[in-house]
Image (spheres, grey):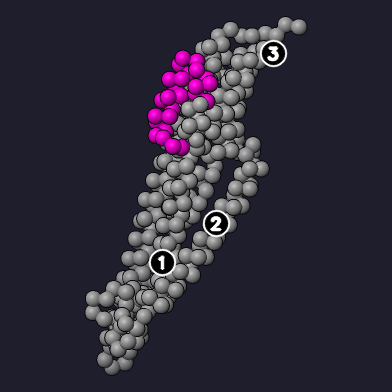
Amino acid sequence: MEQKNAMNKPAARPAAAAAPKGEAKGGGSSLFAILAIVLAFIVSVIIYKFVLGDGSHFQGGNNENNPVSGDYFGVVYKGGPIVPLLMTMFLCVIIFSIERALTIGRAKGTKSIESFVRTIRQKLNVNDITGAIAVCDQQKGSVANVVKAGLGKYQEMARERGMEKDQKILAIQKEIEESTALELPMLEKNLVILSTLASIATLVGLLGTVFGMIKAFSALAQGGAPDAVGLANGISEALINTALGIGTSAIAIVAYNFFTSKIDELTYSIDEAGFSIIQTFAAQHGETEHHSA
């Protein structure tokens, strides 16, 4: 019964074992995130002032006037000072989406992850552990690294004569868990930034909308004839900020859900391969081995 429980016990992921390596990687990732956000803000301000705010997009060559008819650069510029913030968020969504796509792509390895797991299971079914390790070397990536660590422990436990079978199975399982804790946490780095942007982009857009409506109603409140230009600029600012905020938030939500689903696929593949390793070891080493002095 103990044997069966050890084999079927779900794989946990103790993060404590990954602390030293994770801290080093986390520091580099945090620095990248800070630099990316600062760079995105600088680029956004430059684009806002010198591209969108260029006089050629406005009547009379002055960006204080209305935009030239049909010139969308001038229209976006009229969104006001909230526009650079929304542009920064949009650029951050693009930057971190590309960064996560590259990271998860490397974690998957050189070939299809489904094909890799299927090949590993085929090698295990014929007890070809050396061949399975060779497949891991060809595949590369985080998933292959975890599986290779489990297979290496498999070979070590197969040669071990001083431990009982359930102890060997637990040792293999622990090796897989520790390797998972070292490899997978980095896949979720910066996803929190995407989820945060998905939440606050809409709010910042609504803030810009409020500022625009304040300007619009201020123009209407002028004594005598309403300021038509001020009214148009206020409404333009409100609508542009709303559109940029909602658009950025929508892209961030889609990116976050996409990458989360990809990480779940990798996690499931590791669990599947790990279970196959433990199951094969239990089947190939059916009798409990005792070391007699």
Q: Within 10 Å of the Cα at label 3, are there few (<14), some (14-19), or many (20+) other Cα atoms?
A: few
Residue labelled with disc 3: 162
Badge 1 crowding class, 10 Å Cα cut-off, few under 14, some 14 to 19, many 20 or more, is many
- From the viewer's perspective, is residue 195 above or below residue 244? above
Q: CA distance from mark 2 to mark 3?
A: 48 Å
Q: Residue at x 41, y 62 (%)?
A: 90
- Residue at 43% x, 29% y is 116
Q: Nearer the viewer, mark 2 or mark 1?
A: 2
Quadrant placement of the N terminus = top right
Can you give x and y, in whole percent of width and height, for residue 79 in the image? 36, 74
Crowdedness near tag 2: few (<14), some (14–19) or many (≥20) residues, C-alpha within 10 Å: some
Say left or right for 16 vs 69.
right
Residue 106 percent location from the top left of the image: 47, 42
Specify which label sits upstream in the sequence, 2 or 3. 2
| Image coords of residue 188 (percent x, y) | 50, 45
The three-letter code of the residue at mark 1 reads Met
**Depth check: 176 or 139 in front?**
139
